[in-house]
Image: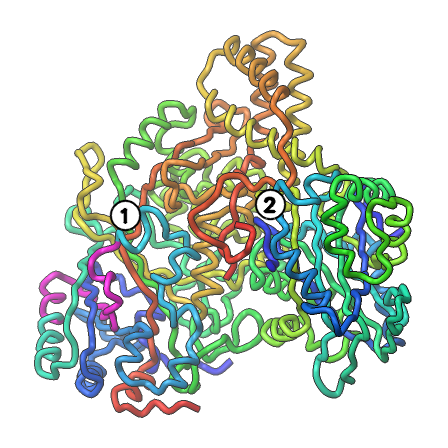
Amino acid sequence: MSRLNETDIQGFVLRGYNLPFARYVFLHFEDAARARALIGRLLPVITTGQHWDAGKPQSTVNIAFTHRGLAALNLPQATLLSFPVEFLQGMKSRAAILGDTGINAPEHWDKLWHEDSVHAWLGINGQSPAALDARCSEIQAMLEQTRGAIQLASQDAAAIMDDGKPTTREHFGYTDGFGNPDYLGVERSTQPGQGKLMPDGTWAPLATGELLLGYADEAGELPVAPVPHILASNGTFMVYRKMHQNVATFRVYLDEHAAQYGGGKEKLAAKFIGRWRDGTPIELSPDKPDQSIVKDSNRNTNFSYGADLEGTRCPIGAHVRRVHPRDAFGFNGRLIDRRRITRRGLPYGPPVPEGQPASDSDERGIVFMALNASLSRQFEFVQQQWIEYGNDAHQGNDKDMLMGNHGGKGKFVVQGDAGAANPPIICANLPNFVELRGGDYFFLPSITALGMIAMGLVDPR
Amino acid sequence: MSNINGKVYAMNAITPMKPWKTWVVRAILFALGHVNLLRQDVVNLSFIEFARWVVVPRRGFPSLGGGQAKEDLKYDYLLFFSNFNGTWNQYIDAFSAVLSMGLNLVWRWSEKFPGSVPVTPFKEYIARVQFDTDYYFTAYPHATANDLKSAHIVQASFDSLVRRSRQCTPEEFKSAYLNFVIQVQAHLGETGQAPIVF
Amino acid sequence: MPNQNGTVYGLTILSPIINDEKASPSHDLQIRNYLATLPTGEESPFALAPGTHLARLVVMDDVIFVGAPAIEEHLQSKYLIFESNCDGDLDTYLTGLAAAAGQHLDAVWSHCVGYPGAANRPAFVAYMKACQIETTFFFAAVNNKSVPETLRALQTQRAVADFIARHQRIEPAQLQAKFAEFVTRLESEPPPKPGSAGSPRAIKTGGRNE
């Protein structure tokens, strides 16, 4: 395949920056011409996928648009209509499909999302709060000078710190940051277990078209994309979801059920996700966490479930097994190669160390973003069929333990064996550990496409 | 009219075949029915409850007189009826990803079949040859093929345990019960309502 | 023989629908209208008569023109397709349908050529067989369990999951006693009715069967 032109692709798509501070700014356009001028001003500071040979920058900037945003920029009707249906409708209209009902329904979302006024997302990351603020001031100045957009709201997020050092932990105490897929042509530190499983047991990168529009995907064709090609190529779609975490509820639930569980509290917590809280995959180390595995990039994502079809090591309904079944569905993993997503995001809100009191009503959680070439085939499918439902994993209607929209019902089965330290246990009457507070679908254009949008040069075919 | 009832989707499709090709299809379907290897993949895909192909030769449409003319057709027709779990897109995606050779074997003899890979032209073809169900009944709308198989496993284990429980001490029972739980622990998914088809 | 797969029978019936230009609405539309209001749950004729796992009724207007260079052609008659996946042998199944759901069958099939009515059982069975097409290939995920066995297994599965969840930390003597009570209760529960969908939900799939 042809080499990727990394200077044309927004850096946010190609790699996680590992900059520990972020601000996500949401914009509304009132006038197309002024909005285009703003994009023109922003263009030179948008971070591309170019390698940082001179070291990490102090801050990065990336931009994405909702369908309403593209319409507000006066893209031609024919172009607007050529976008996939789910992007046209937006995430709020798809709430029933995604299982965003009850407490996750749009009427409970943050005010920002109530009026369908979000047109653009700016993702700003920084090495320090000062660097972040400096960059945001610069952008604020551009907003004022061009009068190109109103800032509706912003969301701060930051890595949870340990003695001032950023970690990849989230608020329930789990170490995150594993498992982003490898794609052909995307240069990043790859490791076995992230791509697709080959018949001989090795891992190969996924087709580029699973992430980027304009390239062949795993089905041997170009993914459905808007026209003209030049608007779509090197772009991708992004899901943004602000997930509130009920830390108090989680801790109480874990403690109560750990008291009944022969394997102990940390093991039960590991069974929920499929990794010990330090990141060790329980498939590789079922009895205890093992930092030597976590630190070894050849091992920490390199496992499959073929020898554990009964779920005795990693429960069949555990989170990592649900969202990346590897070989659990047979057929050498071919049923899942087109259901992978790239995740970005950071926690938000003040962390509460174990042992200190936490409250569910405190504003804390995780800003979850997913990047994929097809929202319906990738993110929406995983959300609907593998998180809020379990039939493909032979778990009927059972939902993902931590992320599912349980409403106090449902159950999670931890499969076990006859050993005292690994008994079977059913966790029932599941509360909502996580609540959706808002979000939408965005289109992340290439640098070329941004330039065309800025100059008002998008032509329908 | 609905193609959907609970967790199961009724797909109907009709494709024309030049009559000489019908014999090839009959031979292939015969082989599929008698050679286990070919059938195993369909079993493992595990979201089809029942499915059938029906060859209707051009002179094979029932004619009961009543003053209505017999059919006078150039093509034979291949009818396909499937009862599957999941969404239309999911179903076709899975077949295209995993069973493309088998599908091609049966459908390549139908006029203008584009092949089952890549998936987009395949979906367009199916959309063209699919016709809709007027009335759909299932005795178990809240269960998928996976749920059914699991339920039978649980029933069998349960019957075993019930027999055992009548003749043992509490300690013996505790151990038999643990074994029972381990046997059924992967088969306890709740049945209920389906996600929205999209 | 291809219609049979284990204990399940794949019945495919194509009944020509009466062509009568003077009928208004036409016979095929009358069938459609009737089917649109026929219940698909516990009150379905296929729930009241025994042996139906899954069944569908489809009015097939015509064959489909797939596009040039294929030849365009048309059927002389429309057909009512009846596809059923059922237990047991064909004669028992058909007579069971006629006995339990005669008036529904008549309401639908009276629009088809040569239909004798469900009351005359032998003629009814003969008519259905005259319209039967051999199923060329029949796949069944589960081919050895009847409808009542299946419904009972689903009931057991649900009850067992519930029992296990509620009795996780319990003394052996108590467990055995509780289990015995559970077995008695489960055995005395009425078998679930075919076609029952469980509790209603807030969101619609888009299927009419909500």
Stretch in magenta: A109-135
Residue A44 in sight: no
Q: Residue at the location (26% across, 80% down)?
A: A72
| Chain letter of the residue carrying label 2 | B
Foreground pick, A85 / B155: A85
Give the label on residue B24, or none.
none
Residue for badge 1: A170
Residue A188 picture quarter? bottom left
Give the label on residue B141, or none.
2
| Left or right of A316, for residue C70 | right
| Left or right of C167, for residue B131 | right
Give how far across and how far down residue A105 sits, in percent: 32, 52
Above or below C188: residue A329: below
Q: Is residue C186 magenta?
A: no
In three-dimensional space, the C-alpha distance between marks 2 and 1, rounded to whole angstroms, equals: 40 Å
State the SS at label 1: loop
Foreground pick, A323 / B4: B4
Give how far across and how far down residue A304 sits, in percent: 53, 49
State the SS at label 2: loop
Q: Is residue A124 magenta?
A: yes
Residue C136 in sight: yes
Farthest residue, direction front: C22
The crowding category of the residue bearing disc 2, from other C-alpha atoms within 10 Å (few below 14, some 14 to 19, many at least 20), is many
Q: Residue at the location (60% across, 18% down)?
A: C183
Of the two numbered discs 2 and 1 in the rendering, the one whose residue sits closer to the viewer: 2
